[in-house]
Amino acid sequence: MAYLNRRRLTTAICIAILLTFGYPLSIGPSTWLSDRGWLPKSTVRALYAPLFWAYNRSPGSVQTAADSYIDLWSKKAPDKGIIFDPVLESVSVD
């Protein structure tokens, strides 16, 4: 019985960690999909409204870090040499 309780606790901790870090970090891939027209911008705005709310109320250093992370995933990133995808380079996405 103690094994099941420990396993449930471990599962709950893993889920909490996944939600705590996975949700905010998933905005990068969502930005990538949205920039390429595979995900509507309105969907991204709705899914990440809590993050946008927190972003607007956070210190400048946190906003700079968030902007840098999102820039890694945005259309601008291949031009900066951060992400190179030759398929995307040869296809017009605009």
Image: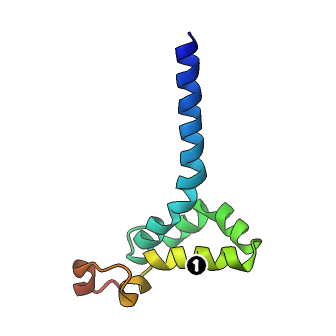
Q: In the structure shown, which secondary structural element does the residue marked by tag 1 occupy? A: helix
Identity of the residue drawn at 36% across and 86% down: 81
Q: Residue 90 in the image: x percent, y percent? A: 22, 86
The quarter of the rendered structure image containing the N terminus is: top right
Dot 1 crowding, Cα within 10 Å, few <14, some 14–19, many 20+: few
Vertical side of 48 occupied by 1: above or below: above
Q: Residue at x 58, y 18 (%)?
A: 5
Position of 21 compared to 81: left or right? right
* Left or right: where 39 falls relative to 50: left
Residue 91 at what x, y percent from top left?
24, 84
The quarter in which the C terminus is drawn is bottom left
Foreground residue, 27 or 39? Answer: 27
- Drawn side of residue 72 relative to residue 59, left or right: left
Extreme residue in the bottom direction: 79
Image coloring type: rainbow
Residue at the image position 59 percent from the left and 36 percent from the top: 13
- Please provide percent x and percent y for residue 3: 53, 16
Three-letter amino acid code at the position of disc 1: Asp
Image position of 24 with respect to 10: above or below: below
| 9 vs 38, nearest the viewer | 9
Residue at 52% over, 75% down: 70
- Name the residue that disc number 1 marks: 67
x and y, in percent, of residue 11 in the image: 53, 31
Q: Tell me: 25 left or right of 64.
A: left
Picture quadrant where residue 86 is located: bottom left
Q: How many marks?
A: 1
